[in-house]
Image (cartoon, rainbow, N blue to C red):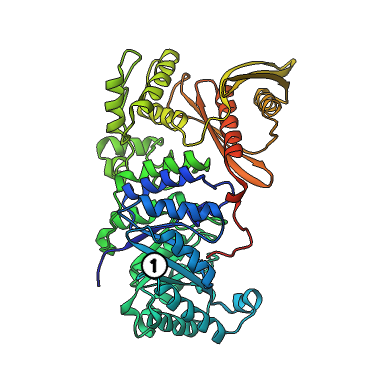
Amino acid sequence: MDNRVIIFDTTLRDGEQAPGCSMTMEQKLRMARQLEKLGVDVIEAGFAIASEGDFEAVKRVSMEIKDCTICSLARTKKTDIDRAWQALQYAEDPLIHTFIATSDIHILHKLHMNRDQVLKTAVEHVKYAKQYSEKVEFSAEDAGRSDVDFLCNIFEAVIDAGATVINVPDTVGYVIPDEFGNLIKTIREKVPNIHKAILSVHCHNDLGLAVANSIAAVANGARQVETTINGIGERAGNASMEEFVMALNTRKNLLDLETGVVTTEIYRSSQLLTSLTGMTVQRNKAIVGANAFAHEAGIHQDGMLKNKQTYEIMTPESVGIHKSALVLGKHSGRHALGERYKELGYELSKDDLEVAYKSFIRLADKKKDIYDADLIAIIQDEISEIPEIYEFESLQVVSGTEITPTATIKLKRGDQSLMDSSIGDGPVDAACRAIDRITGIQCKLINYSIHAVTKGKDALGEVLIQVEYNDRSYAGRGASTDIIEASAKAYINAINRVVHTSESDSGDDTIDQI
């Protein structure tokens, strides 16, 4: 059997369904470009029928990304499949991904059908999708709780109908590794034409077993795994791409399986997704968390000094984490800055380099040491795909234990300068209230996090927030050596997303997805 495992990335579809993780068109394109650089095999760009925004995202990704198969999800409905193809027709290698539930609980309570009707519907729509695309994937929603014999029957039928990929989703994260491995083994044994299709899995993380289940699946013959960057997705999320890939890389002696992922692009992909969505990863997150390669205990440090393999089963460099020291200072020129960005994997246009350079000089005046992490933060903060409808100009805050916190903020909109003041429970609250007064948009702050980009008292502070406006979540990001200023910038960034995002991008929340 082939030892190559296909990585199907659904960050832009299933991952974006996570509350607060919605992305704009330009953000999706930026993420898709990074996924292409990362070397994933398939990009599920969206659910074309869900909204006009999803349709345009699938279309734009199909037109621009050439080194990956581009996929759109579609229910077993002709309107869904038609819409998917309208967006996918521009792709060099398109894939229509259609699905229907196969567990009795879904068939009875959600679909109000019987098994024969489900099988007939699946076959009919796989044949219909096949008229458009040579590549058709069929997913049996809630396969983990489905009757195995029925699952095998429907898989055999859809393969005969033309399905080239058969996907086994553990939609609610219910199964455990031994159980899931046996399910994959049974499907391979009982579906006589399974050799005509790629056997795929899509695991959710409700019990924290998504990656473990995915590994059990490939150990038993599955050859495609559906993942997301940072494991984002519905509820507890999906199988984490970085964890699954590095497990295969690290335990190649046991599994003898490989992927086409460029592992040195993993950390950059994780950081980009965090900056686009505001969804941070916990410090102890495997592979990409801040503590993943940190060693504090004395016995660990002693071992590391003698031989790094005593406590590191992989190197930080293998996943793209740079451990460089001071690289630039305030006397460095644009050329040196541009060259360092190239080394970090960023190809900046002349205009973007100029923006980054001005921010770099301002930062260099405030802190002595400039590190790679500072340079990356500058790019994420200054080079934004969100139009700066409201632009930060200045902030004054008066605060203390004996006085009411007050903030005066000055913003720019076009050629117009706008200024207002407000009090609040604290300096951050006062700044946000002042921004509300200027913009006329009052958001509810639902998540706020701050961390130091580098070490030291003069470290650049990065603030990531999520706000709610009209029952929809928006992310915001800001960075500064002043955390109040960083907070105000993050809030303005979120406000700009609110203004920029049209109502048509909100999607249809009634559509079920695997």
Q: Is residue 476 above or below residue 231?
A: above
> In the rendered picture of this protein, how many numbered marks are placed on residues?
1
Q: Residue at x 34, y 75 (%)?
A: 197
Q: Residue at x 56, y 27 (%)?
A: 489
Asked whether 69 or 448 is in front, the reply is 69
Image coordinates of residue 469 in percent, x first then y, are: 67, 42
Residue 6 appears in the picture as rendered:
yes
Asked whether 293 or 249 is in front, the reply is 249
Secondary structure at numbered mark 1: helix
> What's the residue type where badge 1 is placed?
Ala
Name the residue tied to disc 1: 216
Q: Residues within 10 Å of mark 1 (few under 14, many from 20)?
A: many
Q: Is residue 80 above or below residue 330?
A: below
Q: Residue 137: name its quadrant.
A: bottom left
Asked whether 362 or 507 is in front, the reply is 507
Residue 311 appears in the picture as rendered:
no
Image coordinates of residue 254 in percent, x first then y, are: 27, 63
**Quarter of the figure with the N terminus:** bottom left
229 displayed left or right of 344: right
Image coordinates of residue 402 in percent, x first then y, are: 74, 15
Q: Residue 319: name its quadrant.
A: top left
Q: Is residue 360 above or below residue 121?
A: above
485 displayed left or right of 375: right
Q: Residue at x 39, y 46 (%)?
A: 287
Asked whether 168 or 245 is in front, the reply is 168
Image coordinates of residue 151 in percent, x first then y, are: 47, 80
221 displayed left or right of 487: left
